[in-house]
Image (spheres, rainbow, N blue to C red):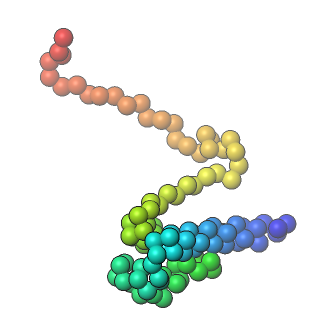
């Protein structure tokens, strides 16, 4: 873990592992086999197997949404900064919101 490149790959693999385990757990809770889930998604059993593989990193947001919908779940993506306190420096300043009024003023 002292090698930054290895640590980054390890963390990324952990994220893919989490996604794979969540899909498999939700599918099993729904009482579906990979083949049955594939049929509902109009895809192949091999594709479902790939999505549930810890080494697979090609999950698309659109496919995850399709899977979640069939399994009565939702997809939530969180992107966080690596260093606490840097979020404020990275974010744009809030734009003031004003309502442009047209026509006569009401009392």
In the image, residue 30 lies at what x, y percent?
A: 45, 71
In the image, residue 73 lies at what x, y percent?
A: 44, 62
Q: Residue at x 63, y 72 (%)?
A: 17
Q: Quadrant of residue 19?
A: bottom right
Residue 50 drawn above or below residue 7: below
Do we see residue 5 in this rendering? no
Q: Residue furthest left?
A: 104
In the image, residue 101 lies at what x, y percent?
A: 22, 25
Residue 50 drawn above or below residue 19: below
Do we see residue 92 in this rendering? yes
Q: Residue at x 52, y 58 (%)?
A: 77
Q: Residue at x 77, y 72 (%)?
A: 6
Q: Quadrant of the N terminus?
A: bottom right
Of 29 and 51, which appears nearest the observer?
29
Of 103 and 2, which appears nearest the observer?
2
Q: Residue furthest top?
A: 107
Q: Quadrant of the C terminus?
A: top left
Of 56 and 70, which appears nearest the observer?
70
Q: Quadrant of residue 96?
A: top left
Q: Residue at x 38, y 70 (%)?
A: 70
- Residue 89 relative to residue 93: left or right: right
- Residue 31 relative to residue 78: left or right: left
């Amino acid at each position: 873990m002292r090698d930054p490149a290895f640590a980054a790959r390890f963390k990324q693999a952990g994220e893919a592992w989490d996604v794979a385990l969540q899909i498999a757990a939700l599918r099993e809770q729904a009482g579906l086999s990979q083949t049955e889930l594939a049929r509902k998604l109009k895809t192949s059993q091999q594709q479902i197997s790939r999505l549930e593989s810890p080494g697979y990193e090609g999950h698309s947001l659109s496919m995850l949404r399709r899977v979640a919908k069939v399994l009565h779940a939702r997809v939530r993506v969180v992107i966080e900064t690596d260093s606490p306190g840097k979020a404020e420096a990275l974010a744009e300043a809030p734009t003031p919101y004003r309502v442009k009024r047209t026509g006569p003023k009401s009392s």
